[in-house]
Image: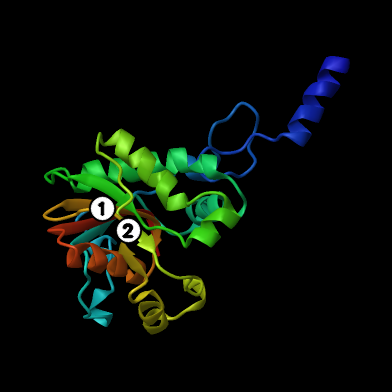
């Protein structure tokens, strides 16, 4: 009786959570039912937006990107969106492990013919990262670097605080992120082919701004990978 009561108390106080999205699950499970049946973004891809070509809407925006391509395992919806939000907004950095592995699989799948020099990531403004306690993009990049056997480097830093991107339209996002980054002190990217990691790609403004900074410093190509694409 006491043992059963303690077990129930443990479950109530420390519920088991899905390794990918962080939602509460049965104690014997590892993933929730939705995460077990997620649909991958299937090739052929539009390399500009990262969607399958059948779902591409790039004809609405003819603006060129600064990065060469972007890929992701999933679209931003359902348990995927909840998992990303749980990781960074609800203090669940451990979710980066499974999400990062999914990104690494997308890299291996879609960038199989490419040889990258190193992995880097979208930085946060220092004060914002201190307040949160971690940078989710850096956590994801660490997993990708391990899974893909690539060096991890902090190549860029964020120069100033920007407005929350989710509150901006496409035009405002581009203005918001313009000239937001600079090369990290002592870092050289001359001639490098770089894999740039972030959690979500919406309009691509953040990735383009970071890629522009890297290319202006001499990087030859910048390819991107994220957990999900809106």
Q: Eyeballing the image, is 196 above or below 150? A: below
Q: Which circle, 2 or 1, is nearer the viewer? A: 1
Frontmost residue, 60 versus 88: 88
137 up-or-down from 183: above or below: above
Quarter of the image holding residue 85? bottom right
Pick the quarter of the image with the C terminus.
Answer: bottom left
What residue would you read off at disc 2? Answer: 156
Task: Tell me the tag on residue 187.
Answer: 1
Q: Nearer the viewer, residue 106 or 172?
A: 172
**Way the structure is coloured:** rainbow
x then y, percent, for residue 172: 41, 82
Mark pair 2, 1: CA separation: 8 Å
10 Å crowding of disc 1: few (<14), some (14-19), many (20+): few
Which mark is on residue 27? none
Where residue 7 sits in the image (x, y, percent)?
78, 23
Task: Tell me the quadrant of the picture where the N terminus can be found.
Answer: top right
Q: Nearer the viewer, residue 179 or 188?
A: 188
């Amino acid at each position: 009786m006491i043992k059963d009561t303690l077990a129930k108390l443990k479950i109530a106080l420390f519920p088991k959570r899905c390794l990918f999205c962080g939602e509460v699950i049965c104690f014997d499970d590892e993933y929730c039912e939705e995460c077990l049946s997620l649909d991958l973004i299937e090739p052929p891809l539009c390399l500009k937006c990262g969607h399958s070509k059948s779902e591409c809407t790039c004809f609405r925006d003819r603006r060129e990107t600064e990065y060469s391509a972007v890929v992701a395992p999933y679209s931003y919806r359902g348990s995927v969106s909840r998992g990303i939000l749980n990781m960074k907004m609800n203090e669940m950095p451990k979710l980066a492990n499974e999400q990062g592995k999914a990104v690494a699989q997308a890299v291996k799948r879609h960038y199989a013919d490419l040889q990258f020099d190193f992995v880097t990531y979208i930085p946060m403004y220092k004060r914002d990262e201190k307040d949160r306690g971690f940078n989710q993009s850096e956590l994801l990049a660490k997993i990708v670097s391990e899974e893909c056997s690539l060096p991890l480097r902090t190549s860029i830093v964020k120069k100033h605080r920007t407005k929350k991107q989710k509150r901006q339209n496409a035009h405002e996002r581009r203005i918001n992120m313009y000239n937001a980054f600079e090369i990290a002190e002592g870092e050289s990217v001359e001639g490098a082919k770089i894999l740039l990691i972030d959690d979500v790609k919406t309009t691509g403004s953040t990735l383009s701004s970071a890629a522009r900074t890297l290319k202006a410093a001499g990087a030859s190509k910048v390819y991107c990978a994220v957990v999900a694409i809106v």
